[in-house]
Amino acid sequence: MAALLPLVVVWPLAATVIVFLSAGRIKGRSAGILATGAVGLSAMTGGVLAAGFMSGAVTYPLHVTLWEWMRVPGFSATIAFALDPVSLVMIAVVTIVGFLIHLYAIGYMAADPGSARFFGCMTLFVAAMLVLVLASDLLCLFIGWEGVGLCSYLLIGFWYDSPANTAAARKAFYITRIGDVAMLCGLLMMATATASLQIDGLLFAVTAGQLSPAVMTGSALLLLTGALAKSAQIPFQSWLPDAMAGPTPTSALIHAATMVTAGVYLLARLHGLFAAAAPAMAIMAAIGMLTLLVAACTALVQSDLKRILAWSTISQLGYMYLALGVGAWQAALFHLVTHACFKALLFLCAGAIIARVDHEQDIFRMGGLRRFMPGVTAAFVIGAGALAALPLVTAGFYSKEMILSAVWRGQPVLTPDFILSGHLLWGGALFGALLTALYIFRCVFLVFYGQEKTVPTGRTRWVMAVPLGCLAFLSVFVGCVEMPGDIAPVHLFTRFVDPAGMAFHPHEPVWLLLAGAITPVAGAGIAWIVWGRSGPVTRTIPETGGGTDDLLPVMPLRFVVRITRYDLPDRLAAAAGWMTRATSRMMMRARRAALHLAAERTAMVGREGTVVLVRMQNGRVRWYAGWIVAGLGAALAWAMLS
Amino acid sequence: MSLLPALVVLPVAGGVIAWLADRLHVGTGVRMRSISWFVSVVVLVLETVLLVVESLRPALQAGGWRDHFFLPWIAQMGIAVRLDMDGLSLSLIWLSLLLCLACVMFSTRQVTVSAGVFHFLFLSTLTGIIGTFLATDLFLFFFFWELMLVPMFVLIAQWGHEDRQRAAMKFFIFTQGSGLLMLLSILGLVIIHYRQTGVLTFDYFALATTGLSPLGSMLLMLGFFVAFAVKLPVVPVHVWLPDAHTQAPTTASVVLAGILLKTGGYGMIRFDIMLFPDAASRFAPVAMGLGIAGILYGAWLSCEQDDIKRLIAYSSVSHMGFVLLGLFSGSWTGMQGAIIQMLAHGLSTGALFLIAGSIQDRVHSRDMRMIGGLWAAMPRLSGAGVFFAVASLGMPGLGNFAGEFLVLLATWRVSPAMAVMAAAGLVLAAVYSLRLVNRVFLAPTRPGAQPVTDFPARQMALLGGIMVAVIVLGLYPRPFMTFAVPSALSMTAAASGERRAP
Amino acid sequence: MTAFPFNAALLLAALLFSIGLAGVLVRRNLVFMLMSLDIMLNAAGLVFVAAGARWQDASGQVMFLMILALAASETAVGLAIILCLHAHGRPSLDADTGNLLRG
């Protein structure tokens, strides 16, 4: 059984190696089938492992140490995998959603000449993500962590013919790299303190009190920075919307379902460390809260379909960070799972739409599409419902409800004197849920209802339709594994990931649940009133490109949106880049000037010296004899006098 | 019977044969024009065989010195031909041979102007390098140190690009001047040793036992340090490097970046830190500061280059900053990290220079604004280029990261602030590497680009070998960490379990 | 045997050497310069002979014989060069005109 664990990673890695080694001899379609097959095999291996788990054939956590990576006095690192319920959940998400997206991509990328490269990068991404998920050593995890960043870079800039795409790719890599360096510093800090980065060992050291509070808080904050950058949370949010330059399957897999949630996974794995670092938790909750509101407001005013989804991803990740911040890592993980399903579904639907309306991404130029593509419409509406958390029928409802109830009880302690109020956070999160329903149904009504503005062509092929169907199914039913206590006592998910966990479901007022159920419906209703009833004013294309002006119904939000649109980190990044270049140029110039000066001086001294020396070497024998005599005399005199 | 002298002499002897063969066959057909190339290939293959034999020999002592050769040379002065090999020398010689083979396979055949002389100089540089890695007599070491310099100077000055004379002169003046300081230090050490014991000797192991005053050892250490700092290079004296790397022919660039810089690191380990441990530890804060300055300055300037070879050259300055930082961090961890970093940098940057040279051969430009996207035309070359650029930005799982991580770990124990600053260099590394990728490889094809040929399978196989080596170094560096470390100073002291670097 | 005036001999030798040196430095004529060189050589020879007499050692006289041979050959070569130059049409014996290493 243990031998199966590395196989999970080996399949996609082997596919990558084969695709790249074939150097273009494996053409697009067969590369796609190979890649999909590899990810499918990986999923099956994961399934076998899960079956072993369920039947009790293996006891977890299952540790597999492959080899020792490095060993120095006072530190050692291993390449080691560990399988426990949390990583099993993540494997399921990565391989199953990954498999569906690969299948979809066979159809989506069929006409692209570089699709072999695309599939090579995608499988490499899956392999790196699985390393990240399975690693039981934080340094080994870091391989996957940077590896997914690299694949994200390669795939965002996949269509390298446009400089804008490669710039977006570089921006994504730079910003996440800043976080990665912070995380590396956190790892160094912990490695110095505990001599190992084994996750189990670290958590044991934390609970045993072997770490000083300063080290715990410091490394927790540094790791948090890394996770925030990876998950595009404030203040690192600006790379994710730009990352939509990549092919849509990439956006679905990397920038919605898996890579951006790596930070959440990491923090969930290390929840023991963060539980001991209260300020980091409070900061996490505050940032999550801020991000989910700001990103939701921004999503409300976007006009680009993929950018709306990108901002919505940031917002949903904000929910997860909020949950982590109040200590409900199980809720965060559950939301991660459901979010992976419905957001992948939404992106794939968006891809199907964009492919058929001649690569138009502006929602104001679409409209009435439900008459042309009913299947995609149904899938998108299911995804939108799950994202908005429409009560009872969608998976998103259950996970969001779990987060809301945890937030209500939470008391993040920033400092002993300053405790964030859980009720306040709950109110914010609920308002965020309203905004979520508002922006996604705005999207639905603008794209699928009303007058048609673009006539779609072609048809959605079955390789693309099947994944949509599967994901739609998952988006509806995956939530049934965990339900609030007031509806039905189903707690399969929490039992599974955290069997030793505390009683997670105390009774709470029923009106909390009701509020959480009614808010999305209200949001969808408002969206119907504003955009759905064919109001001509709100359906026209806003003059200003950004689409701020259709914000009339939500005037007070303008201010928030202003702030987001100002995009401080982006400006900062640009300014830093500019300064880097300017300083670099200045240094070059100074260097050149200094060298020039030095060279000039040397040359001058050389010239002057030459003049003197030339005078001495005049070729007259008698002069030479004279010099000899003078030198001899001087030497004699020196010898006599000293 | 020790093979060490054969290892040293073979390349230069082969170089002479290559030269003579070229002289004898001038102008007798196309095949004969590359006779010296064939001779070089044969020589390098023979050398590889020798090295394999040498690697497979049982070590003289467990975990310590592997081989030894002694022959009196100038007995009156106590100068001898003394060669010793330990794991560090062996791995660096392997690196040298691998890169030289790559050079021969990739670029030296293109040299048509007096190819015989070119190969002679190339191979005698190799002799100098191998001798430098093996010599344990200070005079002999100095001899090889200079031997390595002169042919390289001629290679740059004669076969380089547009501004070659100036670059070569700069290179020569910097290395020669600092070499003289080293000679002074060597003589000073020998004289102090003579005064103390009455024995005139240049023997490394004998001199290591010299008792020195704090000031004296600091001065002598600085003399060595300057010479090695110029080669490494360390920031204030790196000025020669960008010009020399840029103007040198491809072969010389690869040898310079891949191997010559390593002689600086090697010298620092063997003749600086191990000979003068106390002075080195007192000097460590300054040296580590210089290392960080190198990391940041090199990376910073690298971000703003348009010339592809210059960009890689500045990135070398940045990478070598990590080596300096690790060497002077005062712990075994740092030294192991620095050695791994040297090996990984030799492979990845050497390969990048090979690729840059191949690009120049095909596109006739080094200006990244003129090259444009190559992926469409040359997917193999571009794929390899992306791989090595990614390696040079410090991707975990590849060689450079293993070295950098160990160095940072060692630095963090000394001073977290320094480690954070050095880690900031990794962000800049991402900037320059990805700029390189997005301007040369993954970029829109330039309109009006001439059709070019991609790497043939043979060269690709060699590059693939280097890639595998980089991956192995990144994922399984442990053998290198235990094997490629300097052996103890004394010939008799057996390696004990937990050795601490001074 | 009377006391040998060693100091006087040294004085005479120094005098001779100075005269010779002055001749080399001052005279331009090559022939005179050769003669002055001979005077200097003889001064050195005198010192050798005197030293030999002073310490009762024959090597002084041996050295003088060697110097004698040296002086003879030097003069012969020097005069031959001068004649050769003259034969090539060089008009003057001035040493300062020959500073270009060219005929």
Image: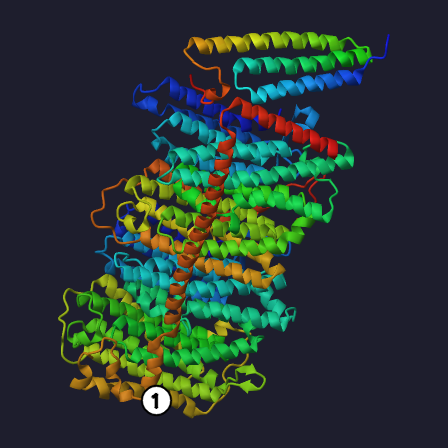
- Residue B178 image position (x, y, % from top left): 56, 41
Q: Residue at x 23, y 75 (%)?
A: A545
Disc 1 element:
helix
- Residue B195 image position (x, y, % from top left): 76, 36
Which of the two residues, A473 or B465, is positioned nearer the viewer here? B465
- Residue B486 image position (x, y, % from top left): 62, 42
Which of the two residues, B176 or B464, is positioned nearer the viewer here? B176
Instruction: Tell me: residue A173, above or below residue B173.
Output: below
Instruction: Tell me: residue A239, above or below residue B189.
Output: below
Inspect this view and state whether residue A517 appears: yes
- Residue B490 image position (x, y, % from top left): 70, 38
The answer for which chain carries disc 1 is A
Q: Which residue is mark 1?
A: A518
Packing grade of label 1 (10 A; few <14, some 14-19, many >=20) is some
Q: Residue at x 51, y 51 (%)?
A: B235
Number of numbered callouts drawn: 1
Q: The N terminus of chain C lies in which quarter of the figure?
A: top right
Horizontal side of A639 relative to A132 (left or right) equals right
Q: Residue at x 53, y 44 (%)?
A: B230
Horizontal side of B62 relative to B376 (left or right) equals right
Inspect this view and state whether residue B498 appears: no
- Residue type at mark 1 is Ile
Instruction: Tell me: residue B422, above or below residue B194.
Output: below
Which of the two residues, B87 or A498, is positioned nearer the viewer here? B87
Which of the two residues, B311 or B178, is positioned nearer the viewer here? B178
